[in-house]
């Protein structure tokens, strides 16, 4: 464990004002994955909204099988269990991304951008990510929403990690030490508000996503089902995915689950 202040459930709960998430919070010193722990509680429907935090993950995962790396006590590693929901995985991803971007933007006083579908960037570097997992039931779907935010990592950590894409932390960007307990509380409150809005006003969620999106109006190259496509991003559809005006002609939507962005640049 580092010398940074540890996460404290009492401090996090003291500032909570939520109705959907964090009805109960559990904190682990170390675990394989907070998503895995959250799923262990899914059989009890009273655990809806349960939030799992960990100071360290041994097998944290990201989208499409990627690993989420974080040294002990250096980030926010959490998962929220959401039970008996409508089949709204894409909208949940958008709402959660907006909540994470808003939390970071308000905390730093500068705009965090969303890179479709689930990455949050500061100054062109990844600072946070999300992973939404689902298990269908009888007419409803259970979800676990995993969130990772880089807080105390230094530049050497990312250099040694040999990442495919540049990354950063809140401490690097602010040249200070972020209070993780306050950040965790802010995150849960903002996420709760956005999930409540999602249930009645999906247009507001989409508008919030577009306002923070770092993809709209950019030329991108994507890989979809082992094929590459290039075009200008003209929109995001919560059901169909990213919409591209293809260089080869025509318009096509690419669902998040089967699509990876390989390259992004501004439109000519």
Image: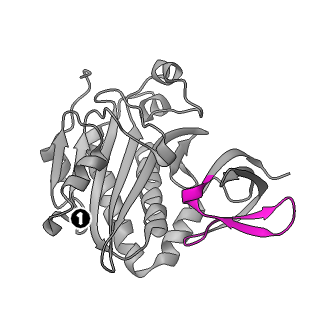
Depth check: give the residue in front, 268 or 225: 225
Residue shown at 33%/30% (left/top)? 74
Q: Is residue 212 visible?
A: no
Place of residue 66 in the rendered image (x, y in percent of width and height, measured from the top left)? 48, 40
Q: Quadrant of residue 175?
A: top left
Q: What residue does disc 1 label?
A: 18
Q: Residues within 10 Å of mark 1 (few under 14, many from 20)?
A: some
In the figure, is residue 196 to the left or right of 240?
Answer: left
Q: Is residue 226 above or below residue 139?
A: above
Residue range (magenta): 237-259
Q: Nearer the viewer, residue 15 or 57?
A: 57
Query: Where is 177 relative to 229, above or below?
Result: above
At a point 73% along the width and 52% down the height, the residue shown is: 227
Q: What's the colour scheme? A: one colour
Q: Is residue 143 or residue 100 the one in the foreground? A: 143
**On screen, residue 160 above or below 145:** above
Figure quadrant of residue 253 = bottom right
Magenta-span inclusion, residue 241:
yes
Total marks placed: 1
The x and y percentages for residue 98 are 47, 59
Q: Secondary structure at mark 1?
A: loop
Q: Position of residue 124 (x, y in %)?
A: 61, 39
User: Is residue 162 in view from this perspective?
Assistant: yes
Q: Quadrant of the N terminus?
A: top left
Image coords of residue 267 (percent x, y): 81, 53
Identify the residue shown where x is 43% and y is 66%: 92
Would you say 155 lies left or right of 188 here? right
Q: Is residue 65 above or below residue 132?
A: above
């Amino acid at each position: 464990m580092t010398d940074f202040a540890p996460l404290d459930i009492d401090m996090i709960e003291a500032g909570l004002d939520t109705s959907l998430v964090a009805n109960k919070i559990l904190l682990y010193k170390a675990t394989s994955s907070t998503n895995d722990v959250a799923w262990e509680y899914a059989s009890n429907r009273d655990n809806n909204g349960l939030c799992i935090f960990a100071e360290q993950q041994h097998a944290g995962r990201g989208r499409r099988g990627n690993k989420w790396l974080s040294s002990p006590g250096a980030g926010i590693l959490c998962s929220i269990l959401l039970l008996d929901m409508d089949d709204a995985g894409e909208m949940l991803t958008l709402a959660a991304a907006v909540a994470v971007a808003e939390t970071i933007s308000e905390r730093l006083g500068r705009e965090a951008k969303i890179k479709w579908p689930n990455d949050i960037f500061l100054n062109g570097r990844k600072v946070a990510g999300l992973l939404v997992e689902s298990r269908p039931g009888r007419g409803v779907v259970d979800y676990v929403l995993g969130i990772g935010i880089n807080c105390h990592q230094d530049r050497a950590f990312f250099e040694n990690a040999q990442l495919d894409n540049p990354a950063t932390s809140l401490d690097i960007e602010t040249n200070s030490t972020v209070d993780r307990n306050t950040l965790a509380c802010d995150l849960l409150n903002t996420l709760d508000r956005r999930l409540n809005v999602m249930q009645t006003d999906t247009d507001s969620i989409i508008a919030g996503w577009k306002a923070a999106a770092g993809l709209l109006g950019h030329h991108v190259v994507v890989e979809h089902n082992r094929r590459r496509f290039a075009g200008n991003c003209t929109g995001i559809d919560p059901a169909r995915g990213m919409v591209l005006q293809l260089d080869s002609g025509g318009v096509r939507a690419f669902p998040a689950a089967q699509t990876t962005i390989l390259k992004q640049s501004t439109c000519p």
